[in-house]
Image (cartoon, grey):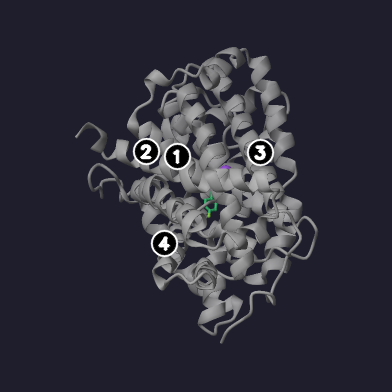
Amino acid sequence: MTTTNDAPKTLWLGRWGFVLAATGSAVGLGNIWKFPYITGEFGGGAFVLVYLACILAVGVPIMMAEISFGRRGRGSPIDAIRRVVQESGGGGFWSLFGWMAMLCGFMILTFYVVVAGWSFSYLWKMLSGGLVGSSVDDMAAIFGANNANPFNLGAWSTLVTVLTMLIVGKGVQAGIERSVSWMMPGMVVMLAILIGYGVYSGGFGEAFAFLFSFNTAGLSSEGLLAALGHAFFTLSLASGAILTYGAYLPKGHSIARTTFSVAIADTVVALMAGLAIFPIIFANGMSPGSGPGLIFMSLPLAFQAMPFGTLFGVLFFLMLSMAALTSSISMIEATVAWLTDNKGVSRKQASWGVGILLWVVSTLAMLSFNVGADWTLGGRNFFDWLDYLTSRWMMPLGGLGMALMAGFLLRNELFKEELGLSNAQHALWLFMVRYVSPLGIVLIFVDALGLASL
Ligand code: PFF
Ligand code: NA
């Protein structure tokens, strides 16, 4: 059973289908939850600078390659990479990067639904008035209590799992495209309002200095690796999402232009989130390094001090939950597409099948916050391992494979056709995927493995 590259089964319906879906995938918990807390953990400005450099020098060129792979190969990462590599006379080995991407997307989703579950549960707390009148210390206690009961926490991550599989099960157009077209816009507005509050709360200057004082002296190898990994994570790269969405992109849409819009939107939202959150942290004497609970403890505190705080809080967590959903659906589309294309199952069957497996593994990840907190290996619990393996290793490695394939293995004509850039632009892109992106990734790996000091 072969499908020709020119006759895809599915394409985005609307002019903005791909941009909305890809932006929906990119903008998510990575921007609003993860970026602020890892920036806090790794000390602020220096981390932000390396992160921005990684987005531009590694993320953007690789995203262009990934979308090209998808559109050229018209299928899941495994199928698309196989076809595109075959077209250039390469071997089956390279499909391994497709397998790794698919596995990576699934692994990310198993812990992503837990964090998305936090967002939904805080939406509920806001709606039901459960946070009213809480002090800084109460907020930490509330976050702890929310995690302590596995049935409570598990119910929320289960809800996210079910919603994700329902949307994906409905199809690319009726499920994914339709949902992103109304979930996307409101978030930016909410964040802008929060920045306004940040200015007024008095901590804005300190927050600005924290984020943008680029003092690279303080950055560790770990911080470098985290910045690189987060650049991949935040742009949804090397985990099947962007590539598979690219498989539905009609010919004639500019891959370069969409890549830049997605990357810019993603970066702006992350920086806005940082500017919204850190003033609250500083104004209330909280620690920027408080870890994964950072936004769930700081933001509700700010909301209740604001006029109409409950209303804003409800809207914010609604938006955050939607941002999470528009990302979670993209993480599983690769696997669902692969199953329907290769295993003779319907999209519904594939979604529910994957959903059950996802539920089992995500339940184990969820237990890391209560009964399984002590199930650790090398100081990391199961949730931490999923995050660590995917962000620090699998995504950078997958990106490296992508860059090497695009830069050296494949016929250059192929990318000329897909990208449609001017000669000078194309040469620049090629230089980036050949040398700059791979070298950046390798250097950071070498540093992280401690090989540099041998
Ligand atoms: N980019 C998403 C975020 O920043 O929240 C996370 C993500 C989505 C990672 C899709 C990987 C992926 F395939
Ligand atoms: Na992101």
Cα–Cα gap, marks 2 and 4: 20 Å
Label 4 lies in ligand 1 vicinity (Cβ under 8 Å) = no
Question: At which x and y percent is residue 350?
Answer: 54, 75
- The mark lying in front, picked from 2 and 1, is 2
Q: In this view, does 319 lie above or below 171?
A: above
> Crowding near pointer 3: few (<14 within 10 Å), some, many (20+)?
some
What percent of the width, then of the height, locates residue 236?
A: 55, 50
The disc, 4 or 3, on the residue closer to the chain's N-terminal end is 4
Q: Which mark is residue 100?
A: 4
In the rendered image, which residue does mark 1 sit on? 228
Image disc number at residue 80: none
**Contact, CB < 8 Å: mark 2 with mark 1?**
yes
- Determine which residue is flagged by label 2: 444
Q: Residue at x 50, y 82 (%)?
A: 343
Residue type at the position of mark 3: Ile
Q: Mark 3 points at which residue?
A: 264
Q: Can residue 15 be seen in this view?
A: yes
Residue most extreme to the front:
423
Amino acid type of disc 2? Ile
